[in-house]
Image (cartoon, helix red, strand yellow):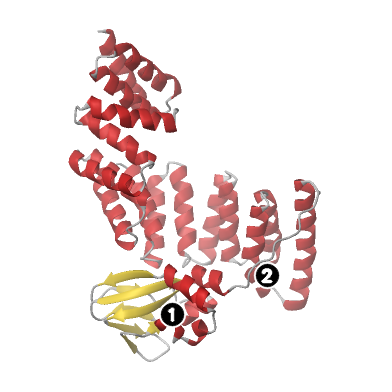
Amino acid sequence: MIILADIPFFAKLPPKKRQYLVSKLKRFVFPPGKRIIREGRSGHFLGFLEKGQLILESSKNPTRRVTSGRHFGSEMLLEGKPSAYTITAKTDITVWVLHRSAWLAASSPPQTKSTPTRQTRSSRAGILFLVISVFLSMVFLVLGPNLLENANQSIRVLLVDTGRPDLAEGYLRFVLDWQPGSARLYQDLGDILFRQGKNPEAIEAYQQAITLDEYIPWAHNNLGVVLLSQDQADLAADQFQMALNLDPANAETYHNLGNAYYQLEQWESAASAYQRALEIDPDLLDVKAAWAATMLKEDRLKEAREEWEAILLEDPGYLLAIQGLGVVSVLEENPAQALPYLEEAQAADPEDPTTRLYLGLALQMLERPSEAAAEFEFVLEKGVDPALQQLAITYLQRLQE
């Protein structure tokens, strides 16, 4: 709080908003020689140097040195500009990072709630789109195109919040007719298309955003997510790597990269990506669970069990950890221990074929063949993974023998 209050544009904020920003700070530790960001690349963050020294180099400005207690990246935070410097750690450094999204949330004026009416949802949404179209026409004529891009985010969110992503798509296409060179608008369009399940169109939108501006990490990341959903894990991994080159401290992108390697069955690379995500944000339970799954693939049963047990200490109802403990107990040939975990997982998600397969194995090991057969038959009927179905066939044949 003291550090923030000493910076003029933070000092203008009320104490409660400064406290909110403090809660959004993320702490990072980097070794000497680590490049934080390259000149000209978008970072969208402000850094507070707690310990160490940074070197700021530029093709246009003199080299600067940042020491403990100073900050850097004001224009990236306030205006969303690319970095004016290549920033490199000269010594071991500890830096606190505040992302632009948190700053915008704290510094924007509060939104007022609209008065509910008796109009139907489709009628309200249609009128809203008409009003927005007229308003945008006036804005464009009077103030020029720059304001359109600044207003885009809040309007798009408003349309999505009304439950009409189709109108949000129409709005973005409407604005793109006026601003066909906006990479940000194409990225937003990709997000909306993906939300609607229009994956091929979403891929095209993200690719267009990257063509216009290759330095948008989230365009690469989101394109990777769509490619991964299309079972193109190798191409997805390339996009996640590009995103991390631009934003090396993004835990979510490391998580996505780990998922791509997992789909490619590159367990060691997947585990490395998950570990990097947890170094950035140790509180990501989904990443911890995925990391434990890679341990299981490498037959590190004890480590996988310990990780899933630790997850359940944080969240006793975490389904993947419950299922994981059931699976590892079966692999440890302890069906009595596995059964309650797998039955709990089945109750939470009765259609999951992996749970049902291992539940069948536990029941078979407990010499309850008719119940085990029912579980294997369920996997054959409902499962979509050929490997699981083949296992179910094998175990059914063993029961019949």
Q: Earlier in the sequence, mark 2 or mark 1?
A: 1
Question: CB under 8 Å between callouts 2 and 1?
Answer: no
Quick check: 121 left or right of 61? Answer: right
Residue 81 in sight from this viewpoint: no
Q: CA distance from mark 2 to mark 1?
A: 25 Å
Q: Is residue 203 left or right of residue 302?
A: right
Q: Percent x, y for residue 373?
A: 34, 14
Q: Where does the image place residue 56, in percent across and percent down from the top left?
A: 35, 84
Q: For residue 185, which quarter of the picture?
A: bottom right
Q: Nearer the viewer, residue 235 or 317?
A: 317
- Crowd band around label 1 with a 10 angstrom C-alpha radius: few (<14), some (14–19), many (20+): many
* Disc 2 element: helix
Q: Nearer the viewer, residue 99 or 390?
A: 99
| Quadrant location of the C terminus in the rendered image | top left
Task: Check the image and report above or below for 215 versus 330.
Answer: below
Horizontally, residue 239 falls left or right of residue 81, namely left
Check disc 2 and report the residue beneath it.
148
Farthest residue to the top: give it.
401
Choose between 299 and 106: the one closer to the eye. Answer: 106
Picture layout, residue 241 above or below residue 39: above
Q: Residue at x 56, y 75 (%)?
A: 107
Instruction: Give the secondary structure at mark 1.
Output: loop
**Mark in front: 2 vs 1:** 1
Q: What percent of the width, then of the height, locates residue 338?
A: 27, 29
In the image, residue 136 sits, relative to residue 8, either above or below, namely above
Residue 73: which numbered mark, if any?
A: 1
Residue 250 position, x and y percent, is 39, 62
Q: Quadrant of residue 335?
A: top left
Q: Look at label 2 and name its amino acid.
A: Leu
Q: Amino acid at mark 1?
A: Gly
Of the pair 289 and 344, the residue shown nearer to us: 344
